């Protein structure tokens, strides 16, 4: 099978899918895409099923060359995209002919781009998923968690479409805008003092430069967390508050157990918006009910999963 040859891999480009489901009880992180919204659009533009393997590109700086004709779709962070020097729009579907090169510049806003191919990129699953987890050494092209390197071949079938297509502009997020992120309070929230909860929701936080695929770290006026003497299972979006009072919001490559008190969980759709925020991004939070979050997520899945 032919596909795309990697000429420049960028800072961190990883094969991802819907995640490694069903292994958390053994300490295996689910991994998967950081931004499920952009990834879903990239696959939908090509008629791919939900969770079809695609390439997650952190910050851009990628160059690929087609060894055979292939239809691709790109969504996510705003960056200059060229095919043999001709600019093509982001959030769109387009063809790459044999011998043509795709060049993705560095992101002007947002953090992650998602490149999908018709039928998906092929790799051998590890524990039921091709998702790349660098820390645990799982998934990816080699099955051992390696990021893309120069010379790698991203195998894909190709596909055929009559024309290009783009995502309508109202459905494209503005990554330059400071987001107001919704939180479902719960977990140990009742053990936090009222002043501590008020501090969390009333202040403007900053996203710390130390944030990564494992967790988004916040910087601001410290909270005073309650005491906790046991660990429990954690999920993506959990807002942990360690002893230093600076919250950590768990991301795709999170651990599976944690002992820090949990203030609540970030709304699933806002977990993906947070992933696109750069370091030093101002962040504010507001409360949302479980029922409202469930309704939002059902609407999202009805559209993208059918």
Image (tube, rainbow, N blue to C red):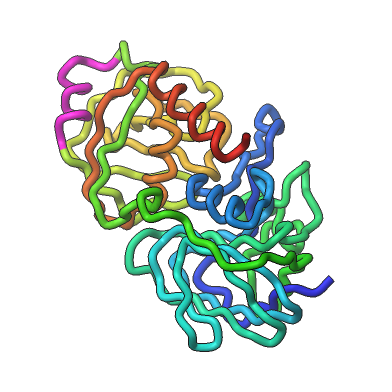
| Residue 43 image point, x, y percent | 61, 53
What's the magenta bit mostly, secondary-structure-wise?
Answer: helix
- Residue visible at 64% across and 77% down in the picture: 96
| Residue 196 image point, x, y percent | 20, 23
User: On the picture, is 106 further left or further right than 306?
Assistant: left
Q: Which residues are magenta?
A: 192-203
Q: Nearer the viewer, residue 200 or 79?
A: 79
Is residue 202 rendered magenta in the image?
yes
- The answer, for residue 18, to whether it is visible in the render is yes
| Residue 234 image point, x, y percent | 52, 28
- The answer, for residue 74, to whether it is visible in the render is no
Furthest-front residue in this view: 162
Q: Nearer the viewer, residue 64 or 245?
A: 64
Residue 304, quarter of the rendered image? top right
Quarter of the image for the C terminus: give it.
top right
- Residue visible at 22% across and 29% down in the picture: 200
């Amino acid at each position: 099978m032919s596909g795309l040859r990697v000429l420049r891999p960028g800072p961190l480009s990883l094969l991802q899918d819907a995640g490694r489901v069903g292994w958390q009880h053994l300490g295996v992180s689910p991994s998967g895409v950081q931004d499920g919204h952009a990834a879903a659009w990239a696959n939908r533009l090509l008629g791919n099923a939900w969770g079809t393997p695609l390439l997650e590109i952190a910050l851009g700086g990628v160059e690929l060359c087609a060894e055979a004709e292939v239809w691709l779709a790109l969504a996510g962070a705003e960056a200059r995209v060229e095919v043999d020097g001709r600019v093509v729009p982001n959030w769109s579907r387009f063809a790459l002919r044999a011998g043509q090169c795709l060049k993705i510049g560095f992101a002007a806003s947002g953090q992650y781009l998602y490149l999908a191919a018709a039928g998906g990129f092929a790799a051998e699953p590890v524990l039921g998923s091709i998702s790349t987890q660098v820390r645990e050494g799982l998934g990816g092209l080699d099955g051992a968690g390696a990021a893309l390197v120069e010379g790698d071949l991203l195998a894909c079938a190709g596909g055929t479409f009559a024309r290009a297509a783009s995502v309508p502009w109202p459905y494209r997020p503005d990554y330059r805008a400071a987001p107001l992120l919704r939180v479902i309070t719960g977990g140990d929230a009742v053990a936090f003092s009222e002043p501590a909860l008020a501090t969390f929701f009333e202040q403007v936080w900053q996203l710390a430069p130390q944030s990564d695929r494992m967790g988004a770290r916040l910087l601001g006026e410290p909270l005073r967390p309650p005491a906790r003497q046991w660990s429990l299972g954690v999920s993506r979006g959990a807002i942990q508050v360690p002893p230093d009072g600076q919250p950590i919001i768990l991301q795709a490559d999170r651990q599976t157990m944690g002992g820090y008190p949990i203030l609540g969980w970030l709304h699933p759709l806002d977990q993906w918006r947070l992933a696109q925020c750069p370091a030093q991004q101002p962040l504010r939070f507001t409360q949302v009910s479980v029922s409202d979050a469930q309704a939002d997520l059902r609407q999202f899945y009805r559209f993208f999963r059918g």
